[in-house]
Image: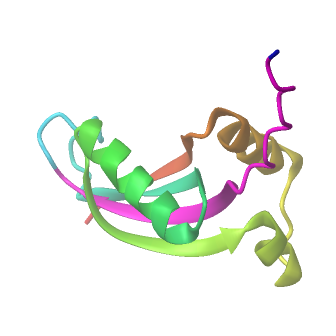
Amino acid sequence: MSEPKKNKKPSRQQVFTLLVQIGRKDGDGLPDKATGAALMCFASGIDEAEAVRETVAILKQADTNPLDVTGYGTLEEREAEGQEIDAEERELMQRALEENSVIVAQMTPFFD
């Protein structure tokens, strides 16, 4: 007889809010005169370091040039700091968690 299936451990994944600054690179899809961009991302990971590594790897695969990443913490950490998080942001965070993915929520190009 086979043993009964054990319940899966609860996931330790969390979603982190990251701001990634990217520089120019051929094929990056940024507007012609842009010097770079800021990307607001929601990334899942066991910890923020993993979320950052995954985000940078995915952005490099997408032909962008990540230069700097600033972490803003999890939903709970942001709420504890008094930040207001709207329904759309919460939805994107939930999607990142469910899909174990990185979601670029906003891109702001930089111009000289």
* Magenta residues, start to end: 2-24
Quarter of the picture containing the C terminus is: bottom left
| Residue at the image position 14 percent from the left and 47 percent from the top | 25
Decide which of 109, 51 is in the foreground and name it: 51
In this view, 38 is above or below 54: below
Res 53 visible:
yes
Residue 22, position as x, y percentages in the image: 30, 58
> How many numbered circles does the render carry?
0
The answer to if 8 sits in the magenta stretch is yes
| Residue at the image position 48 percent from the left and 62 percent from the top | 50
| Residue at the image position 84 percent from the left and 35 percent from the top | 6
In this rendering, position of residue 54 left or right of residue 45? left
Residue 92, picture quadrant: top right
Decide which of 101, 37 is in the foreground and name it: 101
Quarter of the picture containing the N terminus is: top right
| Residue at the image position 68 percent from the left and 54 percent from the top | 13
